[in-house]
Amino acid sequence: DQQVKQNSPSLSVQEGRISILNCDYTNSMFDYFLWYKKYPAEGPTFLISISSIKDKNEDGRFTVFLNKSAKHLSLHIVPSQPGDSAVYFCAAGGGSTLGRLYFGRGTQLTVWP
Amino acid sequence: NAGVTQTPKFQVLKTGQSMTLQCAQDMNHEYMSWYRQDPGMGLRLIHYSVGAGITDQGEVPNGYNVSRSTTEDFPLRLLSAAPSQTSVYFCASKGALYGYTFGSGTRLTVV
């Protein structure tokens, strides 16, 4: 039973536009959420996180929004750049998970010129 | 700081062979874990450890063993390799903050 879901396996966006990646979760005990970025032949790298006590966290071009009532979070990338083309994983943890992170299946973002 | 180091980067095994994937971290992290990544399946947890001497199963533990004799090392053993274990394997460690630090992966092919 997947506790973190990314329902869009792929997203294609033109350079300069906004990319919005979505993620849903089922476990209301999660109290922190993260986004990871993965390039081919490399390990995932941490991008941005948000605690459940916040509804928004911003870091440069990247903003994560959390809607706890809907159990939904999203990652906004503005403006999108070709170098942002990668697989993005949503992850959640906290509560009684003892450090374990639950990952979604990922969304392949392609930013075209 | 090397972070999380995985060896080997690539490996080809014959069905039935055994091998150990090595993982070492130099950040004094208590929490370590092994994931496998398969197309369309995301990152699935195999085994994890919350500290030396303590390990537990994740979502897909069958066919794999782990041990944690030191804080730094968390090897993953394939007991009798099967083609279904062809995958990319990632080791990760976690300190006091939220996020994991991942290794660069081991690409394993079982023929």
Image (spheres, coloured by chain):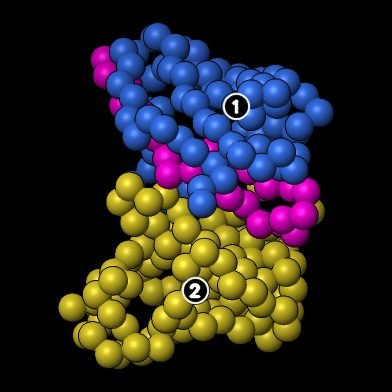
- Distance, label 1 to label 2, CA atoms, is 29 Å
Asked whether the viewer can see residue A108, the reply is no
Q: Residue at x 54, y 24 (%)?
A: A75
Instruction: Tell me where residue A106 appears, x and y as whole percent.
Output: 42, 40
The front one of A110 and A60 is: A110
The front one of A88 and A69 is: A69
Badge 2 marks a residue whose secondary structure is: loop
Taking the magenta stretch, the answer to whether it contains residue A96 is yes
Label 2 neighbour load within 10 Å: few <14, some 14-19, many 20+? some
Instruction: Tell me where residue B78 appears, x and y as whole percent.
Output: 41, 83
Q: From the viewer's perspective, tell me whether residue B40 is left or right of residue A105.
A: left
Q: Residue at x 62, y 33 (%)?
A: A48
Instruction: Tell me where residue B90 appears, x and y as whole percent.
Output: 47, 62
Badge 1 marks a residue whose secondary structure is: strand
- Which chain shows up in yellow? B
Residue position marked by numbered label 1 in the rendering: A72
**Are discs 1 and 2 located on one and the same chain?**
no
User: Disc 2 marks which amino acid?
Assistant: Pro
Q: Residue at x 47, y 19 (%)?
A: A20
Residue A107 lies, with reference to residue B104, above or below; the image says: above
Q: Chain of mark 1?
A: A
- Which chain shows up in blue? A
Checking the image for residue B14, the label placed there is none
The front one of B26 and A20 is: A20
Taking the magenta stretch, the answer to whether it contains residue B21 is no
The front one of A42 and B45 is: B45
Q: Residue furthest left?
A: B111
Residue position marked by numbered label 2 in the rendering: B61
Magenta residues, start to end? A89-113
Asked whether the viewer can see residue B40, the reply is yes
